[in-house]
Image (cartoon, rainbow, N blue to C red):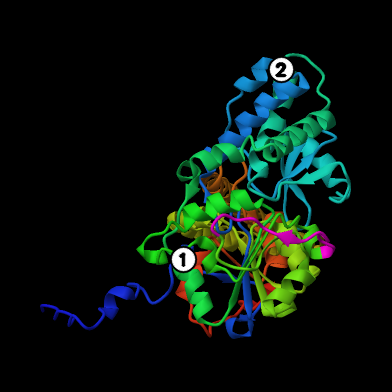
């Protein structure tokens, strides 16, 4: 049957609606704590990795190369250090560096160490036991959390230099190497070595999202105040946002500042949420179209300009501590965490569904065999006790034969259970490596939530892969968290 054409004065609604009734998982907003959009009066955004999404390979390699060269030039490292090549898959967020031992570790949410590397060499189970025998105090100077995407190149460089020196037979001072790398990448950001390259060719480093202006306009049409709160200097924010909001038909030729009610640059987060800068002054942004463009300030200063405070404010950021935790804990704001890696994790999970169903079936089979083993062991114990007190010869012979039969059946099930265990392990290992060949999935570690996954769950009210995913939700949407179940309720 031929479909009738839509009259020119109407919109083909069917073409707007997704083929499925549900929003695709990679385009969803996920909920940890209930949030009603009508209760929000102001919505704010960080810049880097929130509104501005970088091409990870380009920007990470730039930071890596720049820091390498500065280590050689300013810290006297061998020139060969500048020849180390960057591996963008080796480090993920949520890991922890042990600066005292030169190790990098992954933990589950119980702080139980599950994987560890010294430099880029995987550590054996004997070393893991050392971490498991002592309580890990992550607040100690010895440990550093890998919290942001900006951390990834410097951490890989740190690990690579450890390998480089130890392979040459030199003693590596793990604490000093970390301090040197940290200082040089900070210098690269502070002196403009990295930002100047990005500013010269933003299209090379940034991924544009044509729906970004649509989202901000939609929020404002709902009566929300929109603000930018970033640690970036005003000139850098101007370059990035001018590129992201290029004056085309979809922006109405507007300057990027016209999409915001308040702009605050050079905010010095996380201090902004606890004490902030007292020396607030206007931000000198070329062609700025709003009066409320500032540098510095603190939470109180911003809330006065917005006319909203505490749980009337929703803030988007990517840093678990500097954006999300302190915005929530110190300012009482609602929070939405941007996790760019979520898109990759969701796509891999969809591809792995058939394999995971296979693993589930194998696990159920092994559970059935384990239950049968328990029944057989119980019967074996009963017959053994009965045999000890049995005096009639024929009965003893029969019970002895029954015991041998049970032992044979027990061994069969033991062998089958071990075979299933190996098969499950093979499928499970392949599944883990599909996410990341070194560390597995970002949000999980085995059957447990990873430390990073637990941070997202504990700190963020909402989380998603990009801010424009909010276009899939209506103005009065009520974000409901899933029901929390205990094991016996599943």
**Residue 121 occupies quadrant:** top right
Q: Nearer the viewer, mark 1 or mark 2?
A: 1
Q: Check the image and report above or below for 299 versus 406.
A: below
Q: Check the image and report above or below for 366 versus 162.
A: below
Front residue of 371/361: it is 361
Identified at 55% across, 62% down, the residue is 364
Q: Give the CA separation, mark 1 to mark 2.
A: 51 Å
Dot 1 or dot 2, earlier in sequence: 2
**Residue 230 occupies quadrant:** bottom right
**Residue 174 seen in the figure:** yes
Which residue position holds label 2?
A: 167
Let me know if residue 222 is in the magenta part: no
Number of disc labels: 2
Horizontal and vertical percent for residue 118?
Answer: 74, 32
Front residue of 257/54: it is 257
Range of residues picked out in magenta: 274-287
Pick the quarter of the image with the C terminus: bottom right
Question: Residue 213 bears which disc, if any?
Answer: 1
Horizontal and vertical percent for residue 19?
Answer: 32, 72
Horizontal and vertical percent for residue 127?
Answer: 79, 36
Front residue of 176/242: it is 242
Pick the quarter of the image with the N terminus: bottom left
Identified at 32% across, 74% down, the residue is 16
- Pointer 1: residues within 10 angstroms few (<14), some, or many (20+)? some
């Amino acid at each position: 049957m031929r479909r009738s054409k839509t009259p020119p004065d109407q919109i083909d609604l069917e073409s707007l609606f997704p083929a499925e009734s549900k929003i695709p998982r990679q385009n969803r907003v996920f909920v940890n704590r209930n949030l009603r959009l009508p209760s929000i009066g102001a919505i704010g955004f960080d810049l880097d990795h929130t509104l501005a999404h970088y091409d990870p390979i380009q920007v990470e390699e730039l930071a890596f190369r720049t820091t390498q060269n500065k280590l050689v030039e300013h810290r006297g490292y061998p020139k060969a250090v500048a020849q180390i090549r960057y591996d963008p898959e080796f480090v993920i967020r949520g890991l922890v560096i042990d600066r005292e031992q030169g190790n990098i570790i992954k933990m589950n949410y119980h702080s139980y160490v599950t994987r560890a590397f010294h430099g880029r060499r995987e550590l054996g189970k004997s070393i893991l036991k050392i971490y498991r025998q002592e309580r890990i105090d992550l607040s100690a100077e010895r440990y550093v959390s890998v919290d942001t995407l900006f951390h990834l190149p410097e951490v890989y460089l740190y690990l690579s230099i450890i390998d480089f020196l130890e392979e040459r037979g030199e003693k590596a001072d793990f604490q000093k190497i970390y301090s040197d790398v940290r200082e040089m990448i900070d210098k690269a950001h502070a002196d403009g070595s990295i930002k100047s390259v990005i500013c010269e060719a933003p299209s090379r480093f940034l991924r544009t999202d044509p729906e970004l202006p649509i989202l901000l306009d939609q929020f404002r049409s709902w009566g929300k105040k929109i603000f930018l709160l970033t640690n970036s200097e005003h000139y850098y924010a101007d370059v990035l946002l001018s590129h992201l909001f290029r004056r085309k038909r979809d922006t109405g030729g507007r300057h990027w500042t016209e999409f915001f009610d308040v702009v605050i640059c050079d905010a010095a987060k996380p201090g902004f949420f606890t004490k902030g800068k007292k020396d607030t002054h206007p931000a000198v942004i070329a062609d700025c179209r709003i009066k409320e463009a500032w540098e510095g300030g603190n939470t109180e200063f911003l809330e006065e300009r917005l006319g909203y405070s505490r749980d009337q404010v929703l803030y988007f950021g990517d840093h678990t501590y500097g954006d999300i935790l302190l915005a929530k804990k110190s300012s009482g704001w609602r929070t939405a965490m941007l996790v760019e890696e979520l898109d990759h994790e969701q796509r891999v999970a969809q591809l792995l569904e058939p394999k995971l169903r296979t693993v589930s079936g194998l696990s159920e089979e092994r559970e059935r065999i384990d239950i049968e083993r328990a029944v057989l062991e119980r019967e074996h114990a009963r017959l053994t006790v009965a045999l000890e007190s049995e005096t009639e010869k024929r009965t003893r012979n029969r019970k002895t034969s029954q015991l041998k039969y049970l032992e044979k059946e027990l061994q069969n099930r033991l062998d089958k259970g071990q075979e299933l265990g190996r098969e499950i392990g093979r499928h499970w290992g392949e599944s883990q490596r599909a996410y990341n060949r070194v560390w597995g999935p970002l949000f999980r570690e085995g059957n447990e939530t990873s430390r990073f996954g637990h941070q997202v769950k504990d700190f963020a009210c909402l989380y998603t892969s990009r801010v424009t995913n909010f276009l899939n939700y209506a103005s009065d949407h009520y974000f409901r968290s899933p029901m929390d179940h205990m094991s016996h309720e599943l």
